[in-house]
Image: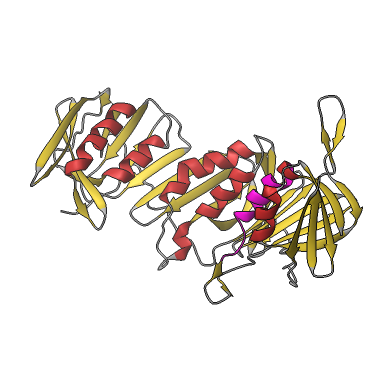
Amino acid sequence: MEINVTKSILLKELAVASKFRGKEIKGGGITEGSPYIALSASENGLTIRSTDKQVYYQNILPLEIVGEEDLEQVHVVKVPGQATLTHKFEEVLRKFPSETVNIKVTGEKLILTSDGVNAEVATIEYDFPAPPSGKEGESINSPKSFFENIISTTGFAAGESDSRPILKGINIKGDGKTFTAVATDSHRLSKYEAEQSIIIDNITIPSKPFASVLETLNGDEKVKLTPLENYVKLVQEDRIVFILLLDGVFPDTTKLVNIGDTNTSSHLKINAKELINAIDRAIPFAKNDKGRPMVHLEMIENSVKIFSNAEDGSMTSTISLIEASEKVLSEKIVLNAKYMIDAIKSHSSKEVTIVIESKQKPVYIISKDTSNTQLVLPIKY
């Protein structure tokens, strides 16, 4: 293999691919996937591949891009071929002063040259894993913003415990009439539901890798998401990314989301920013239960009181309600401050409605955007 590359373009792509390379551990072992990046050159362009097993990343860098006036050549393939790149290669390439660098595979070495600067980097004999394959299911072909909205409204509620790995994901499904995305850590739940003609299997995508992959995709160009046996494949132009699906049965949450009407529960419409600020002010004196900052919520006439108290002090804020149902709960409720703030912020709305039936039942956070429903379980005290 011999190629001339534009240094800045290749380094930028290597930085993206590096997010999904496996990590080496002391003693020469590899945690998951591959610690290397595969580079292959052909008449189609430069193909970059990396994998940490959970994500398999592949992108083709074209030999020409649109310049100021016309197509501008940025890479040249003199001899097709492939090479396995280590961290050292990126470090060496970054040190070159010129934008155009010649890279050539000679024996067991990668030779880099440019304007009187020469470097040799040892190559690695390594069979890079092939991309996942299998039977494809129905696809979702939507702008990147559609998937980003799913992440922003549900992803934060996904679990982090290894004891229940299925809860680390976002469960999505569509029957051609209704599309649903749900995440829960068993203490809170976030649900996105909308009438959309999407047909897709019931699959659970790990939340954090899903968000990381979306960050690497361009602008608001369309992304095609397709289930592929144990993976989900995301395609945007020449970039193809596979994410390993979570194995297991996602819990049935349909019975959990059961918002009572104004006859059976309290509906409190509140200014979202004022509520967030009040909860945040209470955190310094919030008692912690297993890392959960607990704040108290109490309804008083046409206001809601948010307060916390500890041995070293207390904080109380009273917020006027914009609107309230006739039924008003008189009991104090203890809630996780962080969960409440996350839930309110997910609505991106000036006003939210807090729905409370009792201190034993879930508290719902809803808004005019009926596609987004948040649920937080009260803390027993």
Q: Quadrant of residue 122?
A: bottom right
**In this rendering, position of residue 376 left or right of residue 156:** left
Q: Quadrant of residue 185?
A: bottom left
Q: Residue at x 45, y 58 (%)?
A: 252
Residue 18, magenta (yes or no):
yes
Residue 174 seen in the current view: yes
Q: Is residue 225 at least partly visible in the picture?
A: no
* Residue located 67% across and 45% down the image: 12
| Main SS of residues in magenta | helix
The answer to whether residue 77 is magenta is no
Q: Residue at x 56, y 45 (%)?
A: 179
Residue 350 drawn at (x, y percent)? 38, 25
Q: Is residue 35 above or below residue 369?
A: below
Q: Position of residue 344 (x, y in %)?
A: 36, 36
- In percent of width and height, residue 337 lies at 27, 43
Q: Residue furthest left?
A: 311
Q: Is residue 144 left or right of residue 238?
A: left
